[in-house]
Image (cartoon, rainbow, N blue to C red):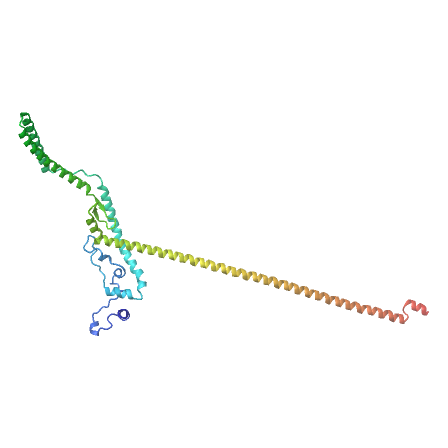
Amino acid sequence: MDAQRALLDELMGAARNLTDEERKGYKEITWDGKEVCGSYMIRFCPHDLFVNTRSDLGACPKIHDPKLKESFEKSPRHDSYVPRFEAELAHFCEKLVIDLDRRVRRGRERLTQEVEVQPPPSISAEKSEQLTVLEEKIKKLLEQVETLGEAGKVDEAEALMRKVEILNAEKTALTQQSQNLLMLAQEKKMALCEICGSFLVANDAAERTQSHVTGKQHIGYGMVRDFLEEHKAAKEKAREEERLAREKEAEERRKRRENEYDRRGRRSDSADRDRHRDRDQDRERDRYRERDRDRERSRERDGRGSRDGRRGMDWKQNNYRNGRDGSRGRYRD
């Protein structure tokens, strides 16, 4: 039912069941409208990632509607619009990353300048005065202990030594406190997060580090960078597939041309063989014709020769009978 309703909404509009009065002032909004956020429908809207953080982008000027997103996902035009919305989101994220990388570079420069060893913090005047007083008291008590010892007043000398020990303990405590402050100042070095550009305390407590990693700003910029990496990889893959397709098409064209050349060559060879065969047949026919003509001419010559021979024989016979032959005439005379 939901799918059918979404399809009807897309084809006929969500206001298809409204009365004429209800249609007045009604402006129908569809997922492909310019006022709808395409980034929200395909992945995420950057405006939603950094709410109440230092990188807060403010409210998105476009509409975020779960129903429109659902309608988009069920639309038959979904796949054709995804590349367009992804390109728009990638363009927005690239600007964010450019600004972020600029901030990261400035942070690195700042840390590089602060790498120089800073002078240890000086002891406060109050503590310095306390140490001076303690040292004076200890010095005077030691002098008194020495005097009492020379006088043989051992008990009194031991009592003063116990006071000296107490004062030395106070002096040690003050000195140790100053050393701890110095160590803390030396250990509290800053570090820079390469993902979100935030400054961190190096070697900080695990709880604080975990709090930073799970914070909105760190997660948000991580999503932005991951999306750009995926989008870049997808574009490179598409370009590579397009290049391979072009190469395959060129190879197929080359093979078709070669096959066409081969067919033409075979046709040419066949035509040559046909021409040679026809030429040989023509020559054979010419030879037969010439031979027939020779035979005909020979028969004609033979025919004329036989007729001339018969005429000669008839003439001799006639002359013989008529006495024209010399021998016969001489005989008759």
**Image quadrant in which the N terminus is located:** bottom left
**Tag count in the figure?**
0
Vertically, is 261 above or below 132? below
**280 on left or right of 184:** right
**160 on left or right of 56:** left
> Which residue ends up furthest to the top in the rendered image?
150
Q: Residue at x 30, y 64 (%)?
A: 78
Percent across and percent down for residue 140 are: 6, 30
Q: Nearer the viewer, residue 251 or 319?
A: 251
Q: Is residue 150 visible?
A: yes
Q: Residue at x 49, y 60 (%)?
A: 259
Q: Residue at x 70, y 65 (%)?
A: 291
Q: Nearer the viewer, residue 312 or 239?
A: 239
**Image quadrant in which the C terminus is located:** bottom right
Examine the image and state in which quarter residue 3 appears.
Answer: bottom left
Q: Nearer the viewer, residue 177 or 40?
A: 177
Examine the image and state in which quarter residue 108 appears.
Answer: top left
**29 on left or right of 266:** left
Percent across and percent down for residue 85 are: 29, 60
Q: Residue at x 59, y 62 (%)?
A: 275
Percent across and percent down for residue 238 are: 35, 57
Vertically, is 60 above or below 209? below
Examine the image and state in which quarter residue 157 appears.
Answer: top left
Percent across and percent down for residue 163 are: 6, 33
Q: Is residue 128 visible?
A: no
